[in-house]
Amino acid sequence: MRSRRTFTVLSTVLAGLSLTAAATLAPAAATQAPAPAPALARAADTWTPRGEDYTDTVTLTDLAIPMSDGVILRGDLMVPAGPDGKAIDEKLPVVVTITAYNKTFQQYGGGLAGGDASYLVKRGYAQLTVDARGTGSSEGTWQAFAARENKDAGEVMTWAHEQSWSNGNTAMTGPSYMGISQIWAGSAQPPGLRALFPQVPGADVYRDVVASGGQLDVGFIPLWLGLVTGTGIIPPAVTASDPASGIGALLSHLGGALTFTTPLLLDAVLGQEPAYDGEFYEERSSINVVDKVNVPTFFVSGEYDLFQRGTPLLFENLQQRGVPTKMVIGPWDHLQGSSGADIDQAGYGELGELQLRWFDHYVKGMPDPTLDSDIAPLTYYEQGSGDWRTSQRWIGPQLQATSYRLSGSAITGAKNGGLTTGTPTAGTADVLPLPVAGLCTRSMNQWTAGLPNATGLASPCLENNALNDKAGVVFETEPVTTPVSIQGPINARLYVSSTSGDGMLSVAVEDVAPDGTVSRLTGGWQVISFRELDTSKSRYLDGKLIQPFHPFTRESKRKLLGGAVEPVDVEVFPTGAQIQKGHRLRLAVQSFDIPHLLPTLPDLLGSLTVMKIHTSAAYPSELTLPTIRPSASTAVSRIRR
């Protein structure tokens, strides 16, 4: 599979970087996700992909793309080739991908590239792959979506629109970093841009991935920064044809590692400004500019992806503003979602076919009268049932808020508390500081971008969360008599006290089968001292909080004092799932999620604490889910396997 090839390439790069994150992966190497859902038959017979217009392609390397500040970016242009093997002399629509992973290196990693570019090129498109500022063969210093780099995205698209080999119409593809770049480019509204196709893009840098819940991501972020830095210090390919540009680019890349990457990591670990939300992350979060994107956009998201939280927020923004948009959410981690190799399971065709259909209609202007009837606005995999569902909206009138109160006492590894829609029994549960929680769970794979899963080695940790649950306290329902279908973001409001006044609540929402198998559906995290709630940015359903928004600023940080009991709202990342008849809904709570999150050094001692969860009418701890209304069958439909 493409994800396995990607892992091989990544491993080669990481081996020379001596990354702490790479070492973290070592004990988890023998892990694998459950087998993907069986592929569906094509959902519609009204459209079939057209054949190739050309049988060969040719690539022109290291084209100079000047930016307004004088920095030269470099791009490789793939175009159709004629029978003589030379580039055809024809103006074509241009599909652009902006990457931070070195365009020369990226061609060997299918998952990083997000599919085979030649599929579209052989059907009459040109593909321009550009190294982002300070990476690959491009000049400048990389600073991870700083304002200047984000401006570059729009300028690259304008340049592509104006070239002699372009017919003036452009589009963009690519996953992850390349998907986020599409949002920045779209927000600039460059001339000629007609459509976007981002896979697993992030929206809010801080909340999506850097510091979920207020602790630092030490699984993915060091790994990612190391990957960009490592591919950036490979001698640029342009050095052979333009030594001055290549050597200059390499020196600027090395300077960026010393002046940006290393200080950023150190400052975050030491609890300096990068540990808090603020201007640094605001500048780099595409959610702040997505309301300027006005071109048709097709999103791909993953239920176990790094940007599980952010991609749906981008989709919702466009849909609410009437921009043509669709989203497919599958049972994929980051590498799986990036490769797009399993997107045909949703029933609409393979990745290249979907891109072709989207671009043929919106870029080439080809009629496609059944596009919207064939492909629903939202298609997602429903964990539990194994079905694919379609819906008009992510959060809409098809949903209702359903709250389950925590009931009674729970003891780590010994006694489970209850979840009830009735009157709760008073009790308490001590969450002990056990820094092994998270090691045997799907979270471990998710927050290392799916690298452990890419080894192809089996592990019960991705299929059964029962062992990990013994490192915390558990509350669960009786076996449900009617299936409970969940769609969207979740909130866990826990009334807590703490011996140190701080600590982190690591929450998992799970499905417990009759045989005792525990399937982790999704998770959330919240540092107690960051509990301040911004109600103006939080989301409610039927008057109940389903997606809390915490400021995560230095000013908002406040410990519990004197054994006080206060509510802490834990944002549990969105998902689609069904608790089937005879199964139990479970809420598991621990104090760590290793190797995903760790506190900053100043907060380390405060995290080694006993947190107490209180359950009673006076302390109504509860789990609130957006569930599909029984009467909403017309709003949400199921596609059987």
Image (spheres, helix red, strand yellow):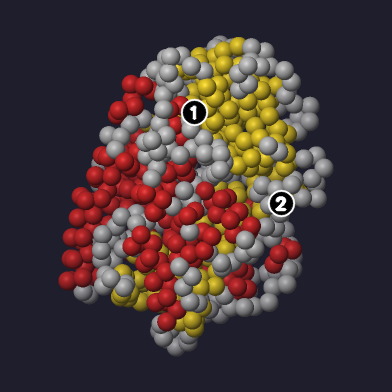
Mark 2: few, some, or many residues within 10 Å (few <14, many ≥20)? some
Res 352 → quadrant? bottom right
**Residue to which mark 2 is pinned:** 391
Q: Residue at x 74, y 20 (%)?
A: 422
Under mark 2, the amino acid is Ser
Q: Is residue 343 left or right of residue 1?
A: right
Q: Nearer the viewer, residue 249 or 204?
A: 204
Q: Amino acid at mark 1?
A: Ser
Confirm or deny contact between disc 1 and disc 2 (CB under 8 A).
no
In depth, the one of 421 and 387 nearer the eye is 421
In this view, 637 is above or below 193: above
What percent of the width, then of the height, locates residue 235? Answer: 22, 61
SS label for mark 2:
strand
* Mark 1 or mark 2: whose residue is earlier in sequence: 2
Give me the residue at 21% from left, 60% from top.
Answer: 252
Q: Nearer the viewer, residue 460 or 397?
A: 397
The answer to whether one can see residue 641 in this image is no
Q: Nearer the viewer, residue 482 or 214?
A: 214
Vertical placement of residue 15 versus 427, above or below:
below
Where is residue 8 drawn, in percent x and y?
Answer: 38, 49
The numbered disc on residue 395 is none
Residue carrying label 1:
506
Q: Position of residue 582 (x, y in %)?
A: 74, 26
